[in-house]
Amino acid sequence: MTVSRLLSGVFSGVSPISRPEWLPAQIPDTAVDLTASVLVVVLTWLTARVLVRLFSRRIAQFVSRPSLTRVSLAAIRLGVYAFGFLTLLRINGLDLGNIALSVTVFSAVVGVILAPIVGSVISGVFLLADQPYEIGDMIELPDQGQGTRGFVDDITLRYTKIFTLDNTFLVVPNGEMRSRDVVNYSAEDTRVRLALDVLITYESDVKTARDRIEAGAREVPEVIAGGPRIRIGGARYPAGPDCLISEFGDHGVLLRLRYWAKEPYSLQTVRSKVQTSIWDTLQAEENVEFAYPHSHMVFDDTSGQLQVGVGEGNTRYRDGPATRTETDTDPDELN
């Protein structure tokens, strides 16, 4: 059975709405159909608004997820619009079976135009069922260059709208959202664990440095200072800042600080405050010094000879053919 025959069979009994007998015969049928069509459009729009307003609170009371609430209200609105559209077809005496010209054309339209839409709708159903993120969650798309981070503003059956931290909107089809990695910072627990590396010299007091770094991190209000150990999977980690030795590097001892931020919404600001606090804390400590790369020039027997000559008003340093003169030097200072 072809698609056109199927549609013709379904709508074969549909006939245009008969003209009311009380209308004057002077009014043409075209004006009657146009007036009825406008009336149906207005009534459909008003009915959709009334039903959405009537059921919005009731649905929100039984459904805790905002995305499901919005999808349910959109389904009610779509159902009213579909009923109004079918009513318009009956008023104008249109037969949907005549719209489908052939199986080939109709199949091509479905395959080219409707297939991506249907795929996005199916992906949207899976997203709503799997609940990887919800409206209001802060998520990140790592594969978008440096990473796109923002808040989920809306979830429909076709796309997800993200309000980025750069004050822009990002609309991503649900099919793409299901095929990529999504980092959710606020799914169940808003606490985020961060790390900071601090390099100190080998001459520094490592134990004092660790204690001061932990104390500096605790002074930041956005950092969890302590409390019960935080559980991640089957492991539990300290809630307060924890500083451990990471490695013995070429230029110093590398200490790694791990701490928990209370909220994931201003991580760069929290990181900057922690670094500032640690800087001020270690600068006031005499036994701890930040390490940085040093270069030492070593001369041995194969490096040549350095000849020094002392004259009036100048000191000459000779090393082979090159000569450098420093004026205004007191010869007595070299004794």
Image (cartoon, rainbow, N blue to C red):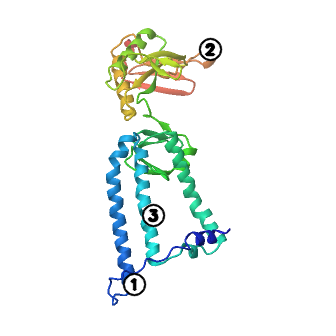
- The label number, if any, that marks residue 82 in the structure image: 3
Kindly identify the amino acid type of the residue bearing the numbered disc 2.
Asp
Residue 36 sits in quarter: bottom left
**Alpha-carbon span between mark 3 and mark 2:** 96 Å
Q: Where's residue 46, x and y in %?
A: 32, 63
Kindly identify the amino acid type of the residue bearing the numbered disc 3.
Ala
Residue 49 against residue 291 in the figure, above or below: below
**Alpha-carbon span between mark 1 and mark 3:** 23 Å
Crowd around label 3: few <14 · some 14–19 · many ≥20 (10 Å):
few
Q: Residue at x 39, y 39 (%)?
A: 64
> Circle 2 sits on which residue?
301
Q: Mark 1–mark 3 contact, CB under 8 Å?
A: no
12 vs 186, nearest the viewer? 12
Describe residue 273's horizontal placement relative to residue 243 as left or right: left
State which tag comes first along the sequence, 1 or 3: 1
Residue 110 sits in quarter: bottom right
Kindly identify the amino acid type of the residue bearing the numbered disc 1.
Thr
State which tag comes first along the sequence, 1 or 2: 1
- The label number, if any, that marks residue 269 in the structure image: none
| Label 2 element class | helix
Q: Where's residue 289, x and y in %?
A: 41, 16
Q: Where's residue 107, x and y in %?
A: 64, 66
